[in-house]
Each structure stands twice: as C-alpha cells, then as structure tokens.
Amino acid sequence: MNAELQPLHRRAFLWNTALAGLGMAVGGPLFAEQNEPLKGYRGPNVILIRWGGGTRRRESISPRHTLSPYLCHELIPRGVLYPQMEIAQFEGLNTSHGEGTLNLITGKYDRYKDAAAYRPELNSKFLGARFEAKVPTLFEYLRGSYDVPDHQALIINGEDRADEEFYNFSNHHLFGVKYRSQTLSLRRYKTWLLREKLRAGTIPADDIEKQQKELAKLEDLDYRVTHETGQGAAIDAFWSRWRGYYGDSGLVNPRGDRLLTELSLRALKELRPRLLMVNYQDCDYVHWGYLDHYTRAVGIMDEGVRALVTAVEADPEYRDNTVFALVPDCGRDDNPFVDVPCQHHFGSRSAHEIFALFWGTGVDKGRVIRGLRDQTSIATTIGALMKVRPSYAEGGVLEEVFA
C-alpha cells in the first residue's frame, strides 16, 4: 500500500496534531505564503454526505426501525459510528438546515442572521434567510493549502434551497472568494442555460427582455460575487454535456434528492472532486404535513448513498483513496400533538440529537463509539484526514476514526 494511504495510527496522529498546534502558536502560516507554490493534493478524497432535511437516528441507525437498510446493515460495520453526536444548546442557536450545514463545514457555531440585517442593500426574505460564514469553510482550508481548482471542491445542492446555494466561501479576510468552492444544482444549470440561449440568440425577440430579467434574478442570488459571469470552463463543459443528455425542459432529468445523486455521480466521473459535499434535503418535505414525505425520502437517500459508494469502489483513482463522512444537519422530534410531524424548529432535545458515520481509506472498521460528541468535530476531523488545519473550528478531532 502507498505510504500516503496507510492507516494513520492514533499516537502518530495526536503527535502530528500537537506539532501543528505548536506551529500555529509560534506564528506558522494558515496556508502557503502567496509567493510559495501550493503542493498538489494526493488525498484522501472526502465525500461529506449531509443526511439531510434533519433525518433522525431512529430511521437511520436503529436496526429495528431503520428505513435506510444499506446504511444501517452494510455501511455501519465498515466504519466508525458515533450514535450520540449532538448539536450544542445555547441561546440563539437554531437547529435548522442552513445552520447545521455551516456547522459541518466551518466547525464553529454561530447565531446566524439573515444578511439583510447588516447589508442595507438587501431585502429580507421569508423562509429564505441568507447566512454568511464568518470563519473559513473546509473548502477554503483545502484550496488555501493545496493546488486544488475550484471545480474539484464541490457542493451538490437541492433545487429548493436558494438560501443554501451560496455557502461557497466565508467572509474571513484571509480566505473568502479566492478560495471558494463551486456548486452544482438545478438552479445553477438554469442560470448557465439562460446565458447560453441569450448568447446564441435562440430566444424569440419578444421574449428576450423577460429572459434577461429572469437571468438577472438568478444571478442576483449570488449577491456577494458581482464580477462573475460563469462558473469556469470545466463546469460550463459539465453543463453542456448535461444539456446534451437531458435537454432543456427539466422534465427529463431526475428531481429532488435523486437529482443530487445524479449530479454527484456525474461530477465524480467528469470533474474528479477532491472534496465533495452532497446536501440531501427531501426529508424536509415533511413540513407539508405528511409523514410519508419524510419516510420515503430516507429510502431515496439510502439508495443514493449506495450508488455513490458503488461508483467510488469501481473507480481505481477513488477506490483506495476516499473517505466518506455521513451526518445529519439536525435532528427531529416526534410530537403527536402538532399538525406537522417531526419538527425541528422548537429547540427540543431531540432536534439536537444526531449521529455521524465515517468509513473508507484508513478509517477503522466495526466500531461504535459511545459517549457524547459534538457536531463541530466533523470539520476538525475532516481537516485532519485531508492534512489541513481548520484553525477556527471549535470541535475536537474524533480520534477513533483513525485506525
């Protein structure tokens, strides 16, 4: 086995972590100096799966009640499970999807407010609060440390999460847009497609003004990037191939979380990401009031994860050089006295109760770690796996992940 890919033993890991901390204490740089060329990244690749829309432990990791048999019966024996992970409880901290996602990629809790609260040029949006991370994301740490292009630091997002479309970079003065990740989503495809049609002159004359306004509306969502005219050549080519396969109508390609799986599979094949985050979300349709929206969505995610694992295992460049991390953004309650089942907005204890599972190259197998762990530990642990220092993350490293 390549020395780069051998399991990292816990004692060596702790020693390396201590040395990194010492480097920080004596003023070591957060990443390579500007005039120092970045090294190529050798791995492991990491696929972070947001077991999304607030999926509970009961339907996930409980053998008696699981609706995700592949996760429960096949993946748990292959990795390290933390069944008692929690989201911290303090005043002003919400247990919702946007906040949970940012907890995972920054490793730091925050009392997030809509950007309109401190950006006077923006209007408030009902159920569409735009949160801006104040500290760097995992994607920024990776790209600030290694020569990884932005199209290989990817977030795969759902079509109904406009407010989550733009977690690509933080507002931190040492990081930010220069080290941004990219997003694949149906919304991004629609933006690319409108640009292409306007450029090619294929839109009827009497519809051009309307389509220009629609394009401006889509572009305006990414209000922090005013100079961008696209996502770069690699992703433009990705969307061109997508269009060639699925066409323009949107009635042929998969929808919902199945769309996220399809985007992820194509991204693995065509863009070769080093860090990939898949933000599953369909469980949250339970807010319409039907429990089966939630239960069916759990099974769809399970099918999607199986497809991702199968694709990685069939790819020689990913097979022995990839780690998966699967963790919910938040938990849910089971209150029979509310009209909408499985809520998470009331700050109940169960909304703070989640889990985490790691498996893949160099990760120990068949371990269940009892005792409380914190959601912010995900970012710190992924940073350790990728040999980057998430310097502003609060959580400790999950040491048991390392063989």
Image: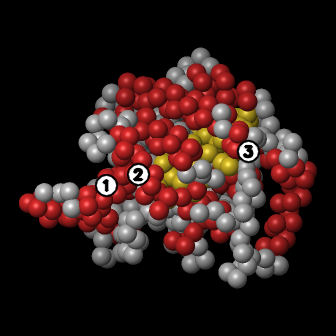
Q: Quadrant of the C terminus?
A: top right
Given the image, on which type of amino acid does mark 3 rest? Asn
Nearer to us in this view, 272 or 294: 272
Of circles 3 and 1, the one toward us is: 1
**Disc 3: which residue:** 321
In terms of depth relative to the viewer, which is nearer, 200 or 37?
200
Q: Residue furthest top?
A: 64
Tag 3–tag 2 contact (CB < 8 Å): no
Identify the residue at horizontal 54%, vertical 48% (top origin): 270
Label located before the other in sequence (3 or 2): 2
Q: Residues within 10 Å of mark 3 (few under 14, many from 20)?
A: many
Circle number at residue 193: 1
Alpha carbon of mark 1 to alpha carbon of mark 2: how far?
8 Å
Q: Earlier in the sequence, mark 1 or mark 2?
A: 1
Query: Disc 1 vs disc 2: Cβ atoms closer than 8 Å?
Result: yes
The image position of residue 368, as x and y in percent, is 75, 32
Give the Cα separation between the discs numbered 3 and 2: 27 Å
Residue 5, given in percent of the width and then of the height, sits at 82, 47
Q: Determine which of the numbered discs, if any, sits on residue 239 in the image.
A: 2
Q: Quadrant of the N terminus?
A: top right
Left or right of residue 217, residue 243 in this image? right
Colouring scheme applied when the structure was drawn: secondary structure
Between residue 376 and residue 35, name the one nearer to us.
35
What element does badge 3 sit on? Answer: loop
| Residue 151 on image: x %, y % | 54, 58
Name above or below for residue 29 compared with residue 15: below
Specify whether 241 is left or right of 13: left
Q: Nearer the viewer, mark 3 or mark 2?
A: 2
